[in-house]
């Protein structure tokens, strides 16, 4: 594709200016992006925002099935240019809202197959997904689709490791197991995986012991506090290196003071400000996909959790747009 047609394609797939139609007007798509049938996405867009309204694998408080609705609504307030980095994602990449994965709210395994089937053809067409959950189970079938040809690196920001083997007497598909399943399936390279912000109490030692035994670098909140965010971010970047990498952000990484609307809150978390700077510090990685999960709007009538999720999703979108442009050769690597 020529750079001229890339420019035309990018110009057709971006939000309307908030200075022409107010940001509070119109139907609430992600970031006010055009809504596109995923079947028509190949060849047209570079980044697809995807809702996954599923919380059937939640082991604690439910509500994340309404995450995509809540984040879409809150995300209409985002503008086009990142004030801190100057990145304008809609100038770098053609973006669209591809709607929601058709989940089955009462069948985890079937929903997993549908999530994988939704993402696989997009990945094959080189479209980068930014998927909005949904509980954290949804990341496993996404990784099955994206890591099919080679295991991916992982930057995982969360209060929890989500590397349990099973919960409630042998249930292996839950929001506490996605990264263990993805490593077992060869979709993640555990030696290129880092988890940041872990804290709280555990049901067993096995969750963290297993992850560390595989080579996953687990960075607890105490270590973040002792060493500082810049040092932790630098180490995370070195761990995933230059290879293809996935970013997964669980909103419960934030302190419940900033994100109360989530199923498994843990005190002692990141401030919104810290979370934004941690995401921003991942600029220049070869990101092939990302998600933002566990926003549960019914647990937060104030809406600040969805606002945090939408704002972080824009920050992540900026990283993905940079990665798309770097792979195309439009901009150099950071
Ligand atoms: Mn999680
Ligand atoms: Mn979590």
Image (cartoon, grey):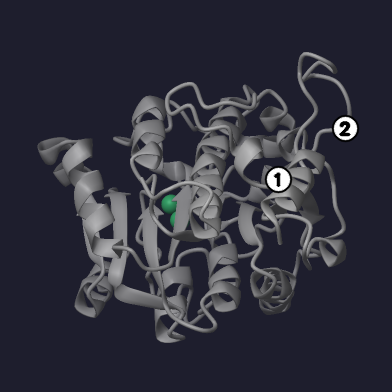
Compare residues 61 and 74 and report the one nearer the observer: 74
Q: Position of residue 257 (x, y in %)?
A: 42, 26
Of tags 2 and 1, the one toward the viewer is: 2
Identify the residue shown where x is 27% and y is 54%.
237
* Side of 188 where 148 appears, left or right: right
The relative height of residue 73 versus residue 325 in the rendered view (above or below) is above
Q: Could you tell me if the residues under marks 2 and 1 are in contact, i.e. CB atoms within 8 Å? A: no
Pointer 2 or 1: first along the chain: 2
Instruction: Name the side, left or right, on which 176 lies relative to 227.
Output: right
Q: Residue at the left extreme?
A: 226
- SS of the residue under disc 1: helix
Q: Which residue is mark 1?
A: 68
Q: Is residue 303 above or below residue 2?
A: above
Closer to the camera, 141 or 15?
Answer: 15
Residue 52 visible, this angle: no
Q: Residues within 10 Å of mark 1 (few under 14, many from 20)?
A: many
Query: Looking at the figure, which quarter contains the C terminus?
Result: top left
Q: Residue at x 85, y 67 (%)?
A: 39
Residue labelled 2 has its Cβ within 8 Å of some atom of ligand 1: no
Q: Is residue 149 left or right of residue 9?
A: left
Residue that appears at 61% across and 59% down: 128
- Cα separation, mark 2 vs mark 1, equals 14 Å
Q: Which residue is mark 2?
A: 27
Pick the residue in front: 198 or 139.
139
Q: Quadrant of residue 33?
A: top right
Q: Is residue 228 left or right of residue 179?
A: left
- Secondary structure at badge 2 equals loop
């Amino acid at each position: 594709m020529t750079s001229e047609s890339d420019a035309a394609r990018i110009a057709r797939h971006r939000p309307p200016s908030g200075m022409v139609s107010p940001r509070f007007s119109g139907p609430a798509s992600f970031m006010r992006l055009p809504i596109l049938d995923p079947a028509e996405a190949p060849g047209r867009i570079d980044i697809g925002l995807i809702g996954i309204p599923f919380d059937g694998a939640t082991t604690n408080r439910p509500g994340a099935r309404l995450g995509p609705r809540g984040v879409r609504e809150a995300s209409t307030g985002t503008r086009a240019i990142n004030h801190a980095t100057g990145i304008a994602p809609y100038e770098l990449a053609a973006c669209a809202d591809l709607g929601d994965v058709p989940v089955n709210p009462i069948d985890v395994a079937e929903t997993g197959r549908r999530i994988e089937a939704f993402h696989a053809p997009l990945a094959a067409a080189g479209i980068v997904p930014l998927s909005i959950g949904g509980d954290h189970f949804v990341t496993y079938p996404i990784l099955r689709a994206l890591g099919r040809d080679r295991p991916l690196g992982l930057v995982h920001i969360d209060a929890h490791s989500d590397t349990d083997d099973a919960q409630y007497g042998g249930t292996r598909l839950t929001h506490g197991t996605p990264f263990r399943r993805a490593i077992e399936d060869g979709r993640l390279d555990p030696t290129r995986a880092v988890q940041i912000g872990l804290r709280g109490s555990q049901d067993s030692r096995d969750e963290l012991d297993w992850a560390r035994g595989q080579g996953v670098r687990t960075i607890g909140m105490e270590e973040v506090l002792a060493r500082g965010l810049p040092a932790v971010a630098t180490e995370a970047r070195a761990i995933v290196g230059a290879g293809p990498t996935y970013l997964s952000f669980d909103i419960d990484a934030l302190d419940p003071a900033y994100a109360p609307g989530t199923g498994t809150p843990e005190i002692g978390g990141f401030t919104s400000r810290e979370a934004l700077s941690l995401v921003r510090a991942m600029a220049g990685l070869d990101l092939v996909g990302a998600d933002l999960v566990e926003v549960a709007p019914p647990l937060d009538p104030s809406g600040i959790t969805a606002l945090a999720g939408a704002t972080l999703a824009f920050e992540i979108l900026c990283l993905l747009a940079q990665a798309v442009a770097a792979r195309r050769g439009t901009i150099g690597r950071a």
